[in-house]
Amino acid sequence: MEAIVYNIEGKETGRTVNLKEEVFGLENPNDHAIYQDIRLILARKRQGTHKAKERGEIKGTTKKPYRQKGTGNARAGSRKSPLWRHGGRVFGPRPRDYGFKLNKKTRALARKSALTYKAREEQLTVIENFEFESPKTKQFLEILSKFNYANKKTVLITPENNTNVYLSGRNLPKTHVTTAKDLNTYDILNADILLIMEDAVNVINERFSSAS
């Protein structure tokens, strides 16, 4: 599968890159693998810092409220009881990690399935490599405007960490910059357009085709 390479002006360069069939052209993309991987990604984003105080953590007296017998009331040994106002909570939430185990092959299949869908729907554009001498959001936006992507959710995929490019796109609300090795299923499907740098295609081909 071949893809045309465009320059930063939005014009064809006359070059093409190879999109491997086992990464961008699966015959049967696996929707369940995509579902499982996205569920894991969103679960890992949860802070999990919720906490409620149980009876042993409530601040207050430990004195018995009243004598055991003769009052006509139910027996009570502590004002911290969950049955009492301002008492502790029964089985309250505790800090936890919401992540779960998912096989590497399943996650790799999910990414390849997501890339296949983007390639089928022609929501994938390959652009020549570019850099900025310093962070310039205006220049970044001009590049997107050449492709009419300024108002679309766009993920720019770079071959490696590029600080100036990342900082240039950070303030754009509909733009996300990531490296090829950090690309995940959620980023792929959450975007309207994948804008892939030329060298990043080779990284994706090698990294994802080997993970099978």
Image: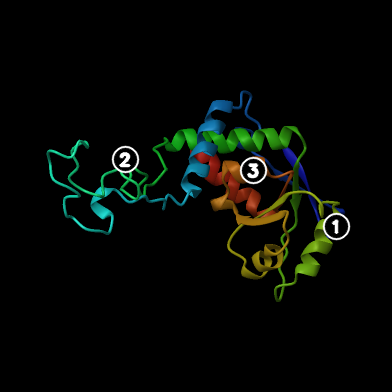
Mark 1 against mark 2, which lies toward the viewer? Answer: 2
Secondary structure category for the residue under label 2: loop
Q: How is the image coloured?
A: rainbow
Residue ranking furthest to the bottom: 134
Q: Residue at x 26, y 45 (%)?
A: 81
Instruction: Say whether residue 21 is left or right of residue 128.
Output: left
Residue underneath mark 2: 91
Return the mark for residue 188. 3
Q: Residue at x 34, y 50 (%)?
A: 86
Q: Position of residue 194 (x, y in %)?
A: 71, 47
Residue underneath mark 1: 145
Amino acid at dot 2: Phe
Measured Cα–Cα span from mark 1 to mark 3: 21 Å
Mark 3 against mark 2, which lies toward the viewer? Answer: 2
Amino acid at dot 3: Ile
Q: Position of residue 57 (x, y in %)?
A: 27, 54
Return the mark for residue 212. none
Instruction: Say whether residue 186 is left or right of residue 135.
Output: left
Q: Position of residue 39 (x, y in %)?
A: 51, 37
Q: Nearer the viewer, residue 44 or 95?
A: 95
Secondary structure category for the residue under label 1: helix
Q: Nearer the viewer, residue 46 or 186?
A: 46
Do the numbered discs 1 and 2 sit on residues whose CB atoms are within 8 Å?
A: no
Q: Nearer the viewer, residue 169 or 23?
A: 169
Amino acid at dot 1: Ser
Sequence order check, earlier mark of 3 and 2: 2
Secondary structure category for the residue under label 3: helix
Does residue 158 appear in the picture of this structure?
no
Instruction: Say whether residue 192 is left or right of residue 204.
Output: right
* 136 in relation to 108, above or below: below
Q: Residues within 10 Å of mark 1 (few under 14, many from 20)?
A: some
Q: Residue at x 85, y 57 (%)?
A: 145
